[in-house]
Structure formats: C-alpha cells, structure tokens
Amino acid sequence: MKRGCNIPTSTRTLAGLSFLLVLASCSGPQSGGTPDPNLPPPDNAVAQVNQTIIYNAAVQREALAQGVIEEGGRLQADTPEFERIVEEMIDQRLLALEARRRGLQNTPEAQRRLAAAEERILGNILLETEIAARVTEETAQRLYSEQTELSRPGEQIRARHILVDSREDADAIIGLTNDGRDFAELAVQYSTDIATRVQGGDLGYFSRDGVLPEISALAFSSEEGEVAGPVQTDSGWHILYIVDRRSPESPPFEEMRSSIIRFLTFETISGLVDQLRAAARIEKIAPDPAPPETLVVEPADAPEADAPADLQE
C-alpha cells in the first residue's frame, strides 16, 4: 500500500523522536582514543593531545551539534570556525585527561553520568545502524516515485466562457465567433456572468473537479483554440473558448531529496521506537513527594510598655 509523507504530530513523537533524530545526526565514531605510539597519526586526525587523538569526524559532529553546519554539510579545515571548534575540543580533552589523572571517573556521581552517556551512545549507534540500512538513495528514489504518482497534478485547462440566458442567444454568439469575432470582446458585450465578463470571460486554469461537471466535461473533451458548446447549467447556457492546456510538472527529485531523507529518517526512528515500546514492559513510577516545608512561626513582638508617668506629657 502506498503511503503519504505525513509527519506524525503526537507530542511524544515530535518531542521525543525529534530529540533522537538530533542525537542520531550528531553521533558517530568516538572522538578520542589512545593511538599506537609507533604509528604516525591517522590521516583524518586534526590534533594529538598527549597520547590521544582528536579526529576530523568528531569536529564535524561538534559543528553539526553547534549549528555551524547543516545535516549533510561539511566544515572546511581552513575556516575560523573549524579552528575554534578544534581549540574547544583540545581544552575539553585536557580537562578530561586531568579528571582521569585525579581518579574522578571512579566517583559515584561520575559513574552515574558515564553510564547515562554510554546509554545515549549505544542508542545512537543502534539508530545509525537502522538508518544506514533503511535510508538509502534507492529507498528515497522509490518513495519519490510513489509520491509523485499519488500527487501528480492532473491536466489543467484555461478557458474563457460566455454565459447567456437561452439556447438561441448561445447559438447566435457561436455564429459570431464563426464569423471571426473576438471571443473576449463578445464576452464583455454579451455575457451575463458579472464576475468574469470584464476579464473577457477568463476562467483561469482549472482542473477536472475545479468547475461544474457540465463545464468540466465540455472543456476536457475540447481542443485548444476551439469554441465549444453550448452546454446548459442551472445558471444558463455556456459557450467556452479553450485558451490553453497544461500538465504541471512535479518538483525534481534533487529538489525534494533532503525532505525525503528527513522523512525516511524520522519514519525509521519512529518505527523502531514504537516496536521496542510495544515489546517492552514499561511502568512509570512517580517520584516520592517532597517533604512538606517546615513552617517557622516568628514570635510576636512584645507590646511596648507605657512610658513612666513622669515622662508622659
């Protein structure tokens, strides 16, 4: 069954899955590691901090996370932004190395936060694996073809019309067109359709279902440049002049590619998360309520004593 590119709009989907989508786009191979001291730095290394390497791929992910580049973009190494991000990552690496030297990674707080980071990284790796398998040029092209077929604009016709009250009047006007009279001028002179008369009866472009069925049937069975009719509707008798026929083109694939990739990525993440939720036993546990605040009652001020009688006025 063919599908439409309608992005889900539930709160959980938009808030939660959009967050996962950002994580997936920003994740990838880790930025550091201890290289073999006997080997030169790899080609995609941009800095070495003591015995660890900062890779270009990590710089690109950080640039994406900071909004410096868009998804699919690339930050060039000779730009000030690239240099700034590298310097920031060097500082961050130095701080992390110093924290390890002090053994801070072994504290309970560090272990909790490292476990949370590991959870995010593993989740991102799973998302990347699914996206790499499902979001391909082939699937994007196939979805484009499906959607183009589903939403292909139908043929449109531009026509002028003259509306009159009787068949006799309509036949007389057709006779005038056969004598070479200009259709637009005849519309201005004879048409009772106030809305289009001053425009020479111009109806503009319309599709098969954009006008009355009688008008549509006559127009789409006529040739460009033909005077057709008359045909009767509840409004009266219509004569048509077919000005033009066109079949609007769908946007090319390259113009739609980024939107299709985003949709497929979103759909992949949404489907995976929904599948995992359906298979899991999930129970939300309300946190313990906060203890009530202790009400501190300030002692009332003692009433002021009357002044001694000898001091009273």
Image (cartoon, rainbow, N blue to C red):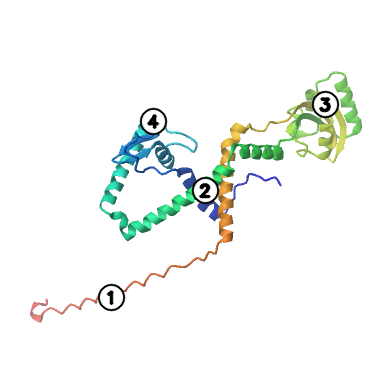
Q: Which residue is mark 3?
A: 223
Calculate the distance from the C-alpha at mark 3 to the C-alpha at mark 2.
55 Å
Q: Which residue is mark 2?
A: 127
Where disc 2 sits, the SS reads helix
Q: Which residue is mark 4?
A: 77
Calculate the distance from the C-alpha at mark 2 to the C-alpha at mark 4.
28 Å
Q: Horizontally, is 274 left or right of 305 in the view?
A: right
Which residue is at 84% across, 36% downward?
217
Answer with mark 2 or mark 1, whichever residue precedes in sequence: 2
Towards the viewer: 167 or 49: 49
Mark nearer the viewer, 3 or 2: 2
Q: Amino acid at mark 4?
A: Ala
Calculate the distance from the C-alpha at mark 2 to the C-alpha at mark 1.
56 Å
Are the two marked residues, 4 and 3, in contact with CB atoms closer than 8 angstroms?
Answer: no
Towards the viewer: 102 or 42: 42
Where disc 3 sits, the SS reads loop
Which residue is at 31% across, 44% downward?
93
Q: Which residue is mark 1?
A: 297
Q: Amino acid at mark 1?
A: Val
